[in-house]
Image (cartoon, grey):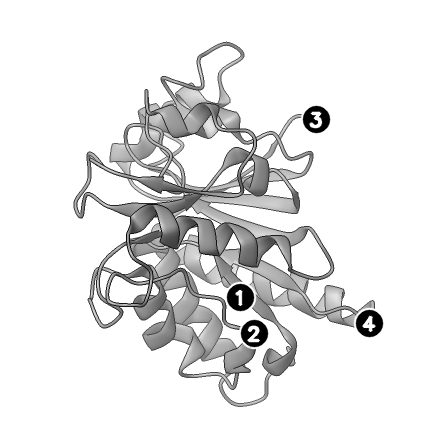
Amino acid sequence: MSPRVEVLPSAEALATRVAAEIVAKLVAVQAEGRVPSIALTGGTIADAIYRSIASLESDEPSVDWMQVDFWWGDERYVPADSSDRNDRAVGLDLLDVVTVDPARVHAMPAADEVHPDLEAAAASYDQLVRTREPGDFDLVLLGVGPDGHVASLFPGFPQLDVDDRIAVAVTDSPKPPPERISLTFTALNQAGEVWFLVSGEGKADAVARALADDGSVHDTPARGITAPHRTWWLDQAAAGSL
């Protein structure tokens, strides 16, 4: 199934629109009597979206935030209090503003926790994700790098070919910090919906390559996302090469 492509005039308009759409999605899942399961991402536009959600929901929330399961698509393997961590930014921008159940916030392991090494930390998150209810993610949010990477699945890296694990260790990341944990395509594609959140002229070439009729996943990892319901949320600059 071809992805849906939505182009907004600016990064600000993109953040506002996607924030409203995320709220609507969570409300719809809860109206079905289920606990929504959402996998979060990091990055500048994602942080703006989380701040917009917090603004929408801070006074009279539409979502029962105590009944939302939060996961992460990838994380930097650094100490828990590091400003490099995606979960710390989401906490400051959203989770510390709305009232959430800490037991439903499933952060990836940090480097200062009990795991002996990165591989063991990734394996522990792999096992945790496998226990989630109701099974598949309702919504996965992904940024896209200028090189076409998603989560911490980078061009040419062996993790692109892993199909028997949910979470993997990543070393020598081309973006610092070098050690990370990432969900695999196997996990990311087990989603009711996947939304790409992309802003800025520097991402335009990667967006065009990801949406082209032909291309290699090893050159542009975003092409490896094959969940049936995919939406590309772009600002005008990111859509400039389409």
Callout 1: SS: strand
Residue 242 visible from this viewpoint? no
Residue 169 visible from this viewpoint? yes
Image location of residue 174, percent across then percent down? 19, 34
Callout 4: SS: loop
Rendered view: 101 above or below 151: below
Measure the C-alpha gap from mark 1 to mark 3.
27 Å
Q: Are marks 2 and 3 in contact (CB under 8 Å)?
A: no
Q: Residue furthest front?
A: 116
Q: Residues within 10 Å of mark 3 (few under 14, many from 20)?
A: few
Q: Which residue is mark 2?
A: 104
33 sits left or right of 14 in the view: right
Image location of residue 103, percent across then percent down? 54, 78
Rendered view: 215 above or below 197: above
Labels 1, 3: front one: 1
Q: Which residue is mark 4?
A: 33
Residue 159 shows which numbered tag?
Answer: none
Q: Residues within 10 Å of mark 2 (few under 14, many from 20)?
A: some
Image location of residue 230, percent across then percent down? 61, 38
Quadrant of the image containing the C terminus: top left
Q: Are marks 1 and 2 in contact (CB under 8 Å)?
A: yes
Image location of residue 10, percent across then percent down? 36, 49
Residue 1 shows which numbered tag?
Answer: 3
Quadrant of the image containing the N terminus: top right
Q: Which residue is mark 1?
A: 70
Measure the C-alpha gap from mark 4 to mark 3.
28 Å
Measure the C-alpha gap from mark 1 to mark 2.
6 Å
